[in-house]
Image (cartoon, helix red, strand yellow):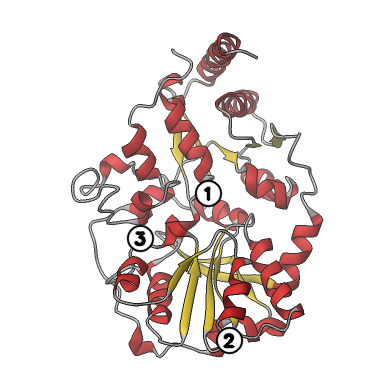
Amino acid sequence: MDKKEERELAQRLVAEITALAETTGRKLRFMEVCGTHTVVIFRAGIRQLLPANVELVSGPGCPVCVTPDDYMDKAIAYAQHPEVIITTFGDMLKVPGTKSSLSEAKTNGADIRIVYSPLDSIQIAKDNPDKKVVFLAVGFETTAPTAAATVLAAEQQGVKNLFMLSAQKLVPPVMETLLNDAQVHVDGFILPGHVSVVTGTGIYEPIVQNYHVPGVVTGFEPLQILRALYRLVKQVAKGEAKVENEYEDVVRPEGNPVSQRITDTVYEAADTGWRGMGIVPLSGLKMRAEYAAFDIEQVMPLPVGELPPAKKTACRCGEVLRGIVTPQDCPLFGKACVPTHAIGPCMVSVEGVCAAWFKYGQGRFEYGK
């Protein structure tokens, strides 16, 4: 399909979305819960293509953004121990904790190393047998299998100085939390593609049925997102609520059983904290008792006194992640908080809503109006 054909198809989809939305007689609000979708939507100017009564709102789809301050404070505290090497993905460096960041800790002498896979941490542990190597295991269902596989590989290779500081999150429980929040209004979900590759589509069925809110799994091209929106508006117009799959060439109903089995071997569901939402029941992963030897919090718990008290800030990242305000509603956005001096994680991460809003503004309007 060439650019002209893509543009024509996009315009037809927008016209059909507009016609269907008009039949509902009300404003429709759809939420994407994937940071990559957020970036594509802003970059392509999809929000501006839609009719006035169809609104897109970004949810808690950025793993760095939803990680709360207390986790960052723990990571920084461990980094400051002379016997610890922290390994992490690069986007964690500038995420602010209560008083500083990993980047500041690194500047002050902490041994913090960027890796492209948690498996890279195994070699670092082998090369530094007198150190405790701690990988910051942050992410959703997509990355949890790789962290679990790293633990299994370390166990098999007899590496005893590699540990995880785990903060993985699970998408369905937080979707349910949002639907139970009186301040949040959502008529349907653009469901995450990467997460669904691992989990499959069945995990969303109870939410869709119990709350009568449709969901469509989709890929990451603008046309795929527009097709997902068409399906969502069509369901609302018909009074339906079901899970549909616009990403069938990649996502299967059962997901990836091998990845699921690896994760379940090492991890189990646990209550965990989300930025802006507090503790969400069974929405995270903790290491099973059989793998406590790889859990840094079990092996070397931090004294309470090492963690700073919670701080108050004008940053509204938590509310942005719930979809109840936009970045422009935050008094810091574009002023004190910019990508080169981010106050909150929504501006730090490339998948953050504030970063996408700041970078792309009104979007590029890939397909015209």
- The image shows residue 316 at horizontal and vertical percentages of 30, 53
Picture disc at residue 179:
1
Q: Amino acid at mark 3?
A: Lys
Q: Residue at x 53, y 84 (%)?
A: 132
Q: Is residue 27 in sight in this rendering?
A: no
Q: Label 1 vs label 2: CA separation?
A: 48 Å
Q: Residue at x 61, y 39 (%)?
A: 213
- The image shows residue 280 at horizontal and vertical percentages of 52, 65
Along the line of sight, which residue is nearer the eye, 62 or 150? 150
Picture disc at residue 129:
2
Q: Amino acid at mark 2?
A: Pro
Pair 3/2: label in front = 2
- Packing grade of label 3 (10 A; few <14, some 14-19, many >=20) is many
Pair 1/3: label in front = 3
Q: Label 3 vs label 2: CA separation?
A: 28 Å
Q: In the figure, residue 142 lies in which quadrant?
A: bottom right
